[in-house]
Amino acid sequence: MEKERKSDILLLCVAAIWGINFVAMKFLLVHISPVNLVLVRFFIGSILLFFLLLFSGDVKVPLRDFIYLCFLGVIGITMYQFFFTYALKYASVTNVSIIINSAPLYGGILSSFFGFEKFNKKKILCILPGFFGVFIIVTKGTFSLESGNATGNILAVVSSILWALYTILSKPFLDRHSPLKVTTYSMITGSVLLIPFAPFCLDLNELMILSAAGWAIMSFTVVFSIVIAFYLWYRGVKKIGPSQTIIYQYSIPVFAAFFAYLLIHEQLYFSQLMGASIVFLSLWLARRS
């Protein structure tokens, strides 16, 4: 019970990190293109993770598992980032935010499909209120999606399914390997496969003129939102299971709205506070189930 409570706290920390990361990314995207930001963050993050793995002394992995971890990297890093970035290009931020946060629904279904966990009516009744809470937070209580390109919405759905798959399919390897090892090898593979896009997308001039404050914020997004958060996310999958871990994704918009209010003084609506209450109630019900 104590171990599960610790996992709950750490996963809320992950959600808080990814929530504040939205604010950090908003600042960085004023100065750096989305593709540039993805390439730099994941390349540096992969290097840091690899050195941490070397320091741990637990580097070896069977070839069969290594190939599968590479597959995880393709799904969760390369493909997810590709579809997510282009979803934002073609659809509104509101639509993408809501669609991406439907991942816990897909996660529960996929976890049951692959035989990792049972997805019963009780879990469905716990997950749906969380999605409703997210919908309230993102739409600020208007309950309406913004009109936009259908292609972008479809890409966002694909992104959400890919993230759910990335989380669910890691479970068998987390039974045999440490969260650090699984995180590192999947991250390195996914980042390496982003490199072919670098000659066409990477703009070194943007990086050279980035201010000291910009690099400090970039460092935060790498160290905390990639290295630490991804490790803790996989630790959660190992300790409490994929479908229980992925529901914490619902709390990311809660923290994003809070930190946007705190740091860049975005307006915080009463409806968003109500949505946050529903999200945390959903998390509590899901964990009790």
Image (cartoon, rainbow, N blue to C red):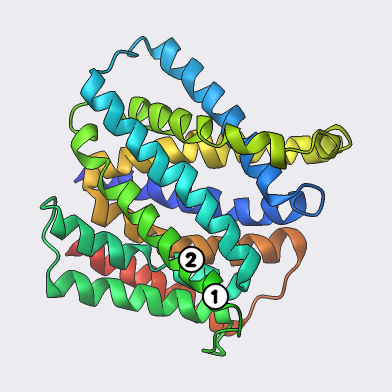
Instruction: Measuring from the top left, give residue 168's x and y in whole percent.
Output: 26, 49
Q: Which mark is residue 156?
A: 2
Measuring 50% from the left and 16% from the top, which residue is drawn there? 51
Measuring 46% from the left and 51% from the top, which residue is drawn there? 80
Instruction: Measuring from the top left, give residue 62's x and y in whole percent.
Output: 23, 18
Name the quadrant containing residue 148.
Answer: bottom right
Amino acid type at image mark 2: Ala
Q: How many marks?
A: 2
Residue 179, relative to residue 50: is it above or below?
Answer: below
Q: Quadrant of the C terminus?
A: bottom left
Left or right placement of residue 270 versus residue 105 in this view: right
- Residue 263 appears anywhere in the view: yes
Amino acid type at image mark 1: Asn
Which residue is labeled 1 in the image? 95
Nearer-the-camera pick, 123 or 195:
195
Nearer-the-camera pick, 164 or 78:
78
Instruction: Measuring from the top left, give residue 234's x and y in whole percent.
Output: 34, 39
Instruction: Measuring from the top left, give residue 149's x and y in whole percent.
Output: 59, 77
Measuring 44% from the left and 39% from the top, which residue is drawn there? 230
| Classed neighbour count for the residue bearing mark 2: other residues with Cα under 10 Å, few (<14), some (14–19), many (≥20) | many
Q: Which mark is residue 153?
A: none
Nearer-the-camera pick, 12 or 174:
174
| Classed neighbour count for the residue bearing mark 1: other residues with Cα under 10 Å, few (<14), some (14–19), many (≥20) | many
Residue 127, relative to residue 221: is it above or below?
Answer: below
Q: Nearer the viewer, mark 1 or mark 2?
A: 2
Find the distance from the CA under tag 1 to the CA under tag 2: 8 Å
- Residue 219 appears anywhere in the view: no
Q: Earlier in the sequence, mark 1 or mark 2?
A: 1
Measuring 61% from the left and 64% from the top, which residue is drawn there? 88
Q: Are marks 1 and 2 in contact (CB under 8 Å)?
A: yes
Residue 40, relative to residue 34: is it above or below?
Answer: above
